[in-house]
Amino acid sequence: ITQLAPERPLGWIHRSYALHELKRTQEAWDNLLQVADRFPDELLVRYNLACYASRLGRLQEAKSWLHKAFEVGGDPARVKLMALDDPDLQPLWKQIGEI
């Protein structure tokens, strides 16, 4: 999908998510990060990068990406609730209200 429709964010998002589920989180991070600027208003790109950074132990980067997700998500409260239910973001749960 990323080759057939590189202008669509979902192919990139799903590829990285699949890599993450295969415990290849660094590869998921690398692949999604390289296209993040192509999709500046896409919530899931920012949200998933926050998840991957958190899993990789890069908590400052995770907070930064999560903040960006809140900005583009349309409804920050909904995105915060989603983050508070996501085990990938568990290291940030206590700080989510401050982001």
Image (cartoon, rainbow, N blue to C red):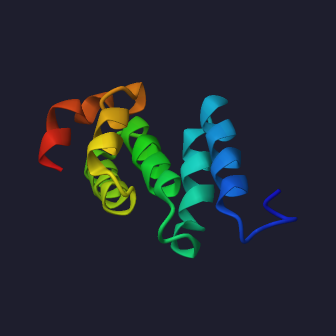
Question: Going 46% across and 56% down the picture, which residue do you hit?
Answer: 43
Q: Is residue 23 visible?
A: no
Where is residue 94 shown, x and y percent of the image?
15, 31
Q: Residue furthest right?
A: 4
| Left or right: where 44 falls relative to 97 | right
Relative to 37, say whether 66 is above or below.
above
| Left or right: where 5 falls relative to 79 | right
| Left or right: where 65 falls relative to 38 | left
Relative to 27, say whether 2 is above or below.
below
When asked about the image quadrant of residue 86, the answer is: top left
Q: Quadrant of the N terminus?
A: bottom right
Where is residue 52 shown, x and y percent of the image?
47, 43
Question: Going 58% across and 74% down the picture, which residue do you hit?
Answer: 38
- Given residues 81 and 20, the one toward you in this image is 81
Question: Going 55% across and 45% down the picture, which residue do you hit?
Answer: 26
When asked about the image quadrant of residue 82, the answer is: top left
